[in-house]
Amino acid sequence: MMDRANEKNEKDEQHSGLNLEDPDFKKIPEMHPETKKHTFKDWFEILYSVCDPKDLTDDQCVDVMEVLMGGSYLTELKQMKDEEFSLNKIEKHFLKKNKTGCIFV
């Protein structure tokens, strides 16, 4: 079984177009269903407070999300990414979890 550090390094390499070692990205917490400390509303506010000033594209924001998500959240994000969901649609999906607590809406 792969440990979390190796998993994170592999994710970072997949998104080498972004400098994820930038200290600003460290401000965005990881989002995992078992360890999350924020609502998705708060998490997206933090995400955008870092991504927007850097003029990242929507696809780049989704790439940042992919690096920071884990567990079922990452599985859902990858499925939506494969189906070419827009950032707006992805955000709405996760925001619904604050209200429903569902695994997949």
Image: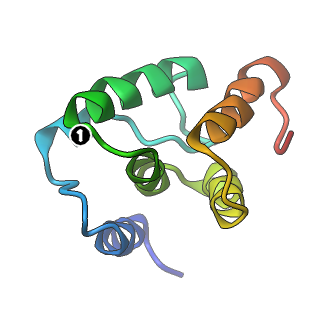
Q: Is residue 52 above or below residue 26?
A: above
Q: Is residue 40 above or below residue 78?
A: above
> How many numbered marks have been drawn onto this rendered protein structure?
1
Which residue is denoted by mark 1 in the rendering? 26
Of residues 27 and 62, the one nearer the viewer is 62
**Residue 39 in sight from this viewpoint:** no
Colour pattern of the rendering: rainbow
Taking 104 as reference, is 40 left or right? Answer: left
**Relative image position of residue 86 (x, y in whole percent):** 62, 45
Taking 32 as reference, is 73 left or right? Answer: right
Element type at mark 1: helix
Tell me which amino acid carries mark 1. Lys
Of residues 101 and 1, the one nearer the viewer is 101
Residue at the image point whose x is 25% and y is 65% from the top: 17
**Relative image position of residue 23 (x, y in whole percent):** 13, 40
Q: Is residue 63 above or below residue 35?
A: below
Label 1 packing within 10 angstroms: few (<14), some (14-19), many (20+): few
**Relative image position of residue 14 (x, y in whole percent):** 36, 74
Q: Quadrant of the N terminus?
A: bottom right
**Residue 50 in sight from this viewpoint:** yes
Residue at the image point whose x is 24% and y is 41% from the top: 25
Residue at the image point whose x is 85% and y is 35% from the top: 102
Q: Quadrant of the C terminus?
A: top right
* Res 50 → quadrant: top left
Residue at the image point whose x is 51% and y is 40% from the top: 31
* Res 34 → quadrant: top right
Of residues 75 and 48, the one nearer the viewer is 48
**Relative image position of residue 91 (x, y in whole percent):** 62, 33
Taking 90 as reference, is 101 left or right? Answer: right
